[in-house]
Amino acid sequence: YEFSVDGASTVSYGGQTARLIMASEMLSALNSSSTTTADLLSMWSNDGYTWASDDANASTKNVGGKTATGNETPLTTSESQAVVDKFVAWFTDYSDNVAQIMDGDEISHPAMAGTAGWVENRELNAHGFEYDQFVAKTLIGGMCLDQVVNGYLSPTKLDVDNADRSEGHTAMEHHWDEGFGYVYGKFGPENADGDLSTDGLLGKYLNKDAFATEKAAVFQAFIAGRQAIVDMDYTERDAQALIIKNNLSVVVAQKAHDYLTGASVDVASLNADYFHGLSEGYGFIMSLQFTNFNGAPYFTHTEVMDMIATLEAGNGFWDRTASELDAMAAQIQAAAGL
């Protein structure tokens, strides 16, 4: 993924790299006994927080401002706010009720229905929720996927100037690169080969062996679409954008399905794999509302929140049944044509 004019690169996605770094540090904070709600909210808005990364400290970007805010996100303003409110609730409950058991173990703080604690090596809230997984997997859809498929590859962002290079790139080139950055940007502008091996969000899952076809299609479409912008072939640009949107949406839907079916197998034992896998599945279900397959999401915000309400009902994950999880997986499979 290299494009230049007169020997100077026209590729730039530093803001995306900064946000992926910030998200990584946020996930680490959700495994610390010293993390407060104020810390997490400061990280979310990049408001006075001191990051471990110099790149993050030098950036004015933030994660919160790019979550559920794609230009053509299929959510109303109130629905987008409802997603943000979920993050705030997770941060608060983690700080108030989970962080206190982070210096313990399964013996001193055993988890049970209604009580935060440990199941083997997994720290859970009173409903069996693992918050770093909630946050990571919801950011996969709510930030990364949304900004690519409903943001930077949308007509709003692509039907812009493609002639003025006074800033080293045209506006159209830059917007396409920013979309690329939400998938491949963790490694900065030197990521010419699309390396995803240590990414923690959308790129991590696109890199899974099960998605070899989608991985190749997405990377080649990003290259071909960027070349089409250079060539001013906007029909080809839009065709490549559709390939990216469809393939990335399939990845999210497939993982939501897979984590539900995996949790269905483990639910009878209520072991660590069950709570961990269903926490991942919860986040991928949250991400379904940001998919864009042939111009539409697989599920609306309302449909997603209905599934989330089912997962949260009663004592949360402690009360779920295999039949509930299998039915939800089948619903996703049918909607996404998996």
Image (spheres, rainbow, N blue to C red):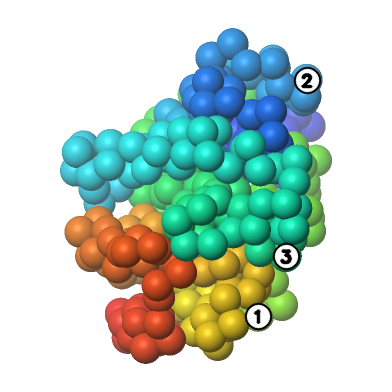
Mark nearer the N terminus (2 vs 3): 2
List the residue tagged with mark 3. Answer: 120
- Please state which amino acid type lies under the numbered disc 3: Glu
Question: Residue at horizontal 48%, vertical 77%?
Answer: 260
Residue 161 quadrant? top left
Mark nearer the N terminus (3 vs 1): 3
Q: CA distance from mark 2 to mark 3?
A: 35 Å
Is residue 137 found left or right of 196 in the rendered image?
left
- Pointer 2 and pointer 1: residues touching (CB < 8 Å)? no
Label annotation for residue 210? 1
Kindly give the residue lying farthest to the front in the view shown: 108
| Disc 3 crowd, CA 10 A, few/some/many (<14, 14-19, 20+) | some
Q: CA distance from mark 2 to mark 1?
A: 35 Å
List the residue tagged with mark 2. Answer: 54
Mark nearer the N terminus (2 vs 1): 2
Mark 2 residue element? helix
Q: CA distance from mark 3 to mark 1?
A: 28 Å
Give the mark count: 3
Residue 199 in the image: above or below residue 45: below
Q: Position of residue 41 (x, y in %)?
A: 50, 25
